[in-house]
């Protein structure tokens, strides 16, 4: 379908530039449905079944790690990984100030004190300089989060970790399949944590996994999710190959139904990641040609494969006559394309209710616990309030015609920045 050519802003009653829809997410196939029906009939719905075992092997191969353990979600994966690399209550764990709140909560939940570090304004990932400044005698681990559509600078992070003898747990909830110098995201540090929640690029509705290369980290994570049991012999079927261990474990298991969906998703993931990369290249190129306040962020040449939870974009209000990002995105939304902002800063998240009686904090020494609310990290603040824009991965599986329509919308809004500003201001005034 050709892009609809209307010069009038949709915000002012013109025809929207985007008439096509983003492809549906998640994607499933006939083979997944067949396998799912077989599992349903089999009655083997959980407890380390054939699909869980097969998925772990397939996923470890895909990422390029030695071991894979599946868990219930991408938060307990971080908890278990931190415990497995040796984080104990009272240790400090460095987390970027910009990530989904669960990254920090996972560390708090294992008794660690979270230290938040500022981000690189271009990639929105943790800034290695800020990270190194945050290291103290108590620091035990770092959680680099490969956020939206950029990887962390893993060369710098691994160097800092080696220098200060710190453990690295990569949070790869957003980027199943990214590669840094041909190494899979999540297989570079001591452990990699993945979320398979509904919106993620590999999903089973809920779910998670940890990848690692160290046998003892693997066994600890396995025991922590499997009520303390441990595998006697990983070469044999786990189902009847368990013995009690000495770990304080939980039930963080995944089901066979989830693993069927994961195996189907994984069979499509490399192709989808390639399509999203193509989209990102073409979109970045298109934005550059158009010019104006919106651009794709620079790609680090050391990233040899970029998986996208979302494309990371940068908005410069200075190139839009002072038009605020929110108004710019509202104009694009009216044109039929929904760009997003980013997460709340961790320290300002209304979900981080540290002193509620159900949080672990009241049971610790409150003097040692940091109240984050008064914090302000300059790069996080600017990205959150003014400059960061994201385009969800679901749009990135769209056709070239769809991409053209989105670019046409951007061009139309860019051609009418003053008008957008006037309309938005008038509406605010009218609303009081
Ligand atoms: C960066 C990041 N880390 C961790 C998580 C937690 O994953 P889950 O929702 O599967 O617990 C998420 C989920 O959105 C996330 O985006």
Image (tube, rainbow, N blue to C red):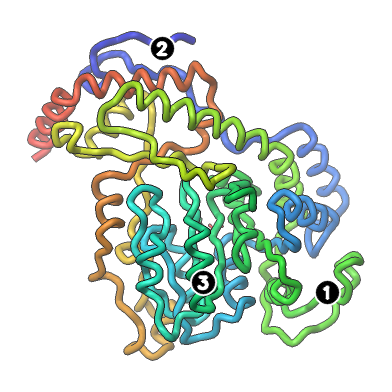
Disc on the earlier residue, 1 or 3: 3
- Name the residue nearer the viewer: 55 or 302: 302
Q: Are marks 1 and 3 in contact (CB under 8 Å)?
A: no
Mark 1 vs mark 2, CA separation in Å: 57 Å
- Category of crowding for the residue at label 3, using alpha-carbon neighbours closer than 10 angstroms: few (below 14), some (14–19), many (at least 20): some
Mark 3 vs mark 2, CA separation in Å: 50 Å
Q: Is residue 310 left or right of residue 66?
A: left
What's the residue at 43%, 67% (across, down)?
A: 95
- Name the residue nearer the viewer: 302 or 261: 302
Residue 387, percent from left and from top: 28, 44
Q: Mark 3 points at which residue?
A: 161
Q: Is residue 5 left or right of residue 162?
A: left
Residue 224, percent from left and from top: 68, 76
Q: Is residue 140 left or right of residue 414?
A: right
Disc on the earlier residue, 3 or 2: 2
Q: In this view, does 280 lie to the left or right of 118?
A: right
Q: Which dot marks residue 231?
A: 1
What's the residue at 53%, 66% (across, down)?
A: 158
Q: What element carries label 1?
A: strand
- Quadrant containing the C terminus is top left
Disc on the earlier residue, 1 or 2: 2
Q: Which dot marks residue 3?
A: 2
Quarter of the figure with residue 10: top left
| 9 up-or-down from 118: above or below | above
- Name the residue nearer the viewer: 16 or 87: 87
């Amino acid at each position: 379908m050709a892009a609809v050519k209307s010069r009038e802003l949709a915000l002012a009653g013109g025809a929207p530039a985007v008439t096509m829809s983003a492809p549906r997410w998640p994607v499933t196939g006939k083979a997944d449905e067949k396998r799912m029906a077989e599992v349903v009939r089999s009655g083997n719905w959980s407890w380390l079944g054939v699909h869980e075992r097969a998925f772990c092997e397939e996923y470890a191969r895909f990422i390029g790690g030695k071991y894979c353990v599946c868990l219930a979600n991408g938060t307990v994966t971080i908890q278990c990984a931190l415990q497995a690399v040796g984080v104990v209550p009272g240790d400090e764990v460095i987390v970027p100030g910009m990530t989904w709140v669960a990254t920090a909560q996972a560390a708090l939940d294992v008794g660690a004190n979270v230290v938040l570090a500022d981000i690189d304004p271009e990639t929105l990932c943790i800034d290695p300089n800020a990270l190194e400044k945050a290291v103290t005698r108590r620091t035990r681990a770092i959680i680099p989060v490969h956020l939206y559509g950029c990887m962390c600078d893993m060369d710098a992070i691994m160097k800092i970790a080696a220098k200060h003898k710190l453990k690295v747990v990569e949070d790869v909830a957003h980027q199943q399949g990214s590669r840094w110098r041909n190494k899979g995201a999540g297989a570079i540090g001591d452990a990699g944590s993945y979320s398979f929640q509904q919106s993620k690029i590999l999903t089973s509705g809920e779910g998670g996994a940890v990848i690692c290369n160290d046998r003892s980290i693997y066994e600890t994570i396995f025991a922590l999710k499997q009520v303390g049991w441990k595998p006697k012999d990983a070469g044999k079927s786990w189902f009847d190959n368990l013995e009690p261990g000495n770990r304080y474990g939980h039930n963080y298991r995944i089901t066979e139904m989830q693993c069927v969906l994961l195996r189907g998703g994984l069979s499509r993931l490399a192709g989808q990641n390639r399509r999203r990369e193509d989209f990102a290249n073409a979109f970045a190129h298109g934005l550059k040609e158009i010019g104006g306040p919106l651009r794709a962020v620079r790609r680090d040449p050391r990233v040899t494969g970029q998986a996208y939870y979302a494309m990371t974009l940068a908005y410069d209000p200075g190139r839009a006559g002072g038009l605020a990002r929110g108004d710019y995105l509202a104009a694009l939304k009216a044109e039929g394309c929904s760009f997003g902002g980013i997460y709340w800063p961790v320290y300002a998240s209304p979900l981080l209710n540290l002193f509620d009686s159900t949080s672990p904090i009241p049971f610790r020494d409150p003097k040692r616990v940091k109240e984050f609310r008064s914090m302000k990290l300059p790069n996080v603040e600017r990205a959150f309030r003014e400059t960061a824009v994201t385009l969800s991965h679901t749009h990135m599986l769209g056709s070239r015609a769809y991409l053209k329509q989105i670019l046409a919308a951007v061009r139309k809004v860019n051609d009418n920045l003053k008008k957008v500003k006037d309309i938005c201001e008038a509406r605010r005034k009218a609303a009081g």
